[in-house]
């Protein structure tokens, strides 16, 4: 169970921490979010402490500022080097294995044009898992290009926000197409933010960023791959784009839906063949990407028989 004192460290409290307190408190704060026997939390705490001992005061100060301010507005947020190092060590202490298949397919797609990664969504830690898996697979250059399209929930708590700082993120409004959306924005405001998000994402892809989009719009509640929301087609509708399907497996075991702690376990990632939007059109390319993801998933993550790309 998460230590109450550690869990209640507010976002504002992090910006107010002095450097000595930050060095002392952050490792046990991260350890408090590890479920299981005490030695699991201790392992993660030691991993974080080893990293923080090697960080300069300036690096820690910058990370604390990012932690306090990231997500305040809609738009792009760059990764923070200190948060990245801490979270990679933390995830590495939890994740026993993270095999990746298909890195060469991703590199091949990147040689042909801007890339949009379409992925199934199992847990809040899906994106930081991808980062760790690519680093372990000998592709840290690809990990550092990842940019996730992120809804407001990603920035809600210090723990989630720390994880968001491992990679670049683009904060967008929660789609009104998602049943459990609790946005206080009007549909028109959501639409205006969405247009800006799409333009920004496409610009980042043209610059070489690997934009990650979870086409289902939210995490799977039963671990089965679900249909895509139609709004995602806008991200793919630009000249030269390639869609690269990515299938994640067993990440839900690391952070199950409804739980707030991490669990020791393993996950895997499989990368499919790039699909040209110029050749097939956005809708057909997305349909093909959905099919590739479904084919790459193990049986317990495959879509139900009645489910297709759009419903």
Image (tube, rainbow, N blue to C red):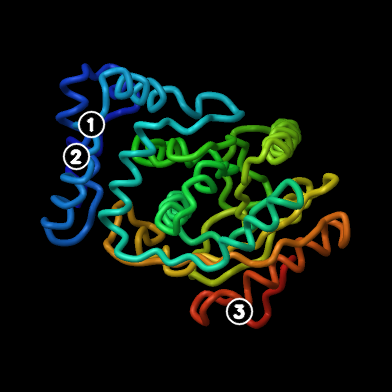
Position of 220 with respect to 266 (left or right) is right
- Image x and y of residue 150, in percent: 56, 42
* Marks 2,3: beta carbons within 8 A: no
Separation of disc 1 and disc 3 at Cα? Answer: 48 Å
Residue 239, quarter of picture:
top right
Quarter of the image where one finds residue 173: top right
- In primary-sequence order, the first of circles 1 and 3 is 1
| Circle 1 crowding by C-alpha within 10 Å: few under 14, some 14–19, many from 20 | few
Residue 146, compared with residue 77, is above or below; it is below
Query: Separation of disc 2 and disc 3 at Cα?
Result: 44 Å
Q: In this view, does 188 lie above or below 116?
A: above
The residue under the point 37% across, 61% down is 256
Q: Are there few (<14), some (14-19), or many (20+) residues within 10 Å of tag 3?
A: few
- Would you identify the image quadrant in which residue 230 lies? bottom right
Q: Which mark is residue 54?
A: 1
Q: Foreground residue, 108 or 257?
A: 108
Residue carrying label 2: 50
152 relative position to 113: left or right:
left
Q: Looking at the image, which residue is at 27% across and 62% down?
A: 264
Classify mark 2: helix, strand or loop. helix
Q: Position of residue 209 (x, y in %)?
A: 63, 41
Look at the numbered disc 1 and give the secondary structure of its residue.
Answer: loop
Position in image of residue 267 (x %, y %):
40, 66
Up the image or down, 50 lies above or below 296; here it is above
Label 3 sits on a secondary structure element that is loop
Tell whether label 2 touches label 1 (CB within 8 Å). Answer: yes
Q: Can you say whether 193 is above or below 275 in the image?
A: above
At x 19% / y 39%, what residue is drawn?
A: 50
Q: Name the residue under label 3.
A: 304
Crowd band around label 2 with a 10 angstrom C-alpha radius: few (<14), some (14–19), many (20+): some
């Amino acid at each position: 169970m998460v230590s109450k004192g550690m869990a209640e460290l507010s976002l504002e409290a992090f910006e107010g921490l002095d450097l000595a307190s930050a060095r002392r408190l952050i490792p046990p704060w991260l350890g408090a979010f590890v479920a299981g026997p005490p030695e699991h939390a201790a392992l993660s705490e030691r991993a974080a402490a080893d990293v923080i001992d090697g960080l300069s005061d300036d690096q820690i100060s910058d990370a604390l500022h990012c932690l306090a301010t990231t997500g305040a507005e809609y738009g792009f947020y760059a990764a923070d080097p200190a948060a990245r190092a801490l979270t990679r060590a933390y995830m590495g202490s939890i994740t026993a294995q993270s095999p990746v298949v298909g890195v060469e397919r991703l590199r091949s797609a990147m040689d042909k044009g801007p890339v949009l990664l379409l992925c199934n969504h199992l847990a809040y830690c899906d994106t930081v898992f991808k980062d760790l898996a690519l680093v372990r697979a000998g592709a840290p250059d690809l990990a550092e290009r990842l940019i996730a399209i992120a809804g407001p929930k990603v920035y809600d708590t210090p723990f989630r926000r720390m994880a968001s700082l491992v990679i670049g993120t683009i904060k967008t409004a929660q789609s009104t197409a998602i049943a459990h959306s609790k946005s206080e924005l009007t549909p028109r405001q959501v639409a205006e933010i969405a247009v800006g998000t799409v333009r920004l994402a496409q610009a980042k892809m043209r610059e070489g960023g690997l934009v990650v989009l979870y086409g289902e719009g939210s995490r799977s509640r039963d671990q089965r791959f679900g249909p895509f929301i139609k709004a995602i087609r806008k991200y793919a509708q630009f000249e030269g784009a390639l869609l690269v399907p990515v299938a994640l497996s067993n990440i839900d075991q690391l952070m199950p839906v409804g739980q707030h702690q991490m669990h020791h376990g393993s996950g895997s990632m499989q990368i499919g063949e790039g699909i040209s939007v110029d050749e097939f059109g956005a809708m057909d390319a997305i349909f093909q990407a959905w099919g590739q993801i479904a084919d790459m998933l193990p049986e317990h993550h495959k879509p139900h028989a009645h489910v297709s790309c759009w419903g």
